[in-house]
Amino acid sequence: TTIPSCDLVVYAAHKSGTMFIHRYFEKFAAVSNFTHFSDNYKLGAEERWNSTISNDITHKVFAPVRGDPGKLPIWGHLSVNNNSRVVVHWRDPRDLIVSAYYSFGFSHMVPPVNTSGYKDLMEKRQHIRNVSIDEYALEQCESIDAQITALKDYLTHLPVPRDRIYVSFYDKMVHNFTEWSNDLCRFVQLPTNLCLQIHDEAMSLVKETRAKPLDVIHMDFHNKSTSVAAHVRDGTSGQYLHLHQDTITSLNEALEPTMTELTRLLAMYSVVK
């Protein structure tokens, strides 16, 4: 049996604002009459997807899909082909490392006890609290380099025409949200009235997000003796620049070969025609 593909699949690198992406596309789907799926729906998500497939529902958006792009699609039922559109949402990998350190080490929601997610997070948290952020950053070089390579391979082998692939950047989402949102709507070829409606709905989400105290507190990168509140990411780009200079140099040297190739590849998809 041929399974219909998603109309829109949004892959977002973990720690690139995926909870905001999730909430944005909830509003996007509600306004534009898409059916929304997300790997944030932990309960009943696959059942919902199967129901949608069996009823041959069109206009689906799966956002965000997180994790290793080499393992996409997340379920066997989710595929992409010539009729799909794919968005890849990306962030500077050095900032991904910094965000992961503070999230996994201090602020990430703890899953229910006696689940594999709880055990995994607690192991990460214990380790992170025993090392400095600079030590953690250097430990993650191999892992983040593998993720960059997987994303590069994923983009290269997508069975989708180039004009149906768009790369969205975290920096633009944070610093120029209106243009970021408009570009996404244009990429999906939504009519202007829906683009404006989505923008209005999403702006309320932006204001709500920016109003939270945790988003305006600057963290002390090298002092873990302060409260958890001091370890909050302020949401801007370039957070890795607070690392020690020797750490930054080592990160740049380790990631430079794959980053250069990925940057060239991303530039091919980052303009909405």
Image (spheres, grey):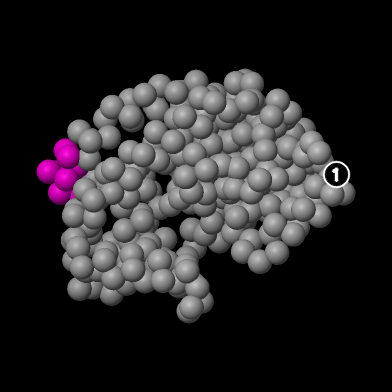
Q: Who's the residue at 56% across and 42% down the image?
A: 72
Q: Who's the residue at 79% across and 36% down the image?
A: 2
Q: Which residue in the rendered view is the most extreme toward the left? A: 246
Locate the N terminus and report the quarter of the image it occupies: top right
Report the side of 28 relative to 213 (left or right).
right
Identified by mark 1, the residue type is Asp
Locate the C terminus and report the quarter of the image it occupies: top right
Front-lying residue, 40 or 186: 40
To which quarter of the image does residue 256 belong? top left
Which residues fall within the magenta stretch?
A: 243-250
Q: Is residue 66 above or below residue 162?
A: below
- Where is residue 218? Give x, y as percent: 30, 60
On whether residue 97 falls in the magenta region, the answer is no
Q: Which residue in the rendered view is the most extreme toward the right? A: 55
Front-lying residue, 163 or 116: 116
Element type at mark 1: loop
Q: Who's the residue at 74% across and 34% down the image?
A: 190
- Where is residue 270? Give x, y as percent: 52, 27
Front-lying residue, 237 or 164: 164
Residue with the mark numbered 1: 56
Report the side of 227 relative to 84 (left or right).
left
Q: Which residue in the rendered view is the most extreme toward the bottom? A: 113
- Where is residue 9? Give x, y as percent: 64, 40
To which quarter of the image does residue 205 belong? bottom right
Disc tally is 1
Q: Is residue 251 above or below residue 155?
A: below
- Where is residue 194? Give x, y as percent: 76, 40
Q: Who's the residue at 51% across and 24% down the image?
A: 156
Report the side of 59 relative to 159 (left or right).
right
The answer to whether residue 54 is visible is: yes
The answer to whether residue 192 is visible is: no
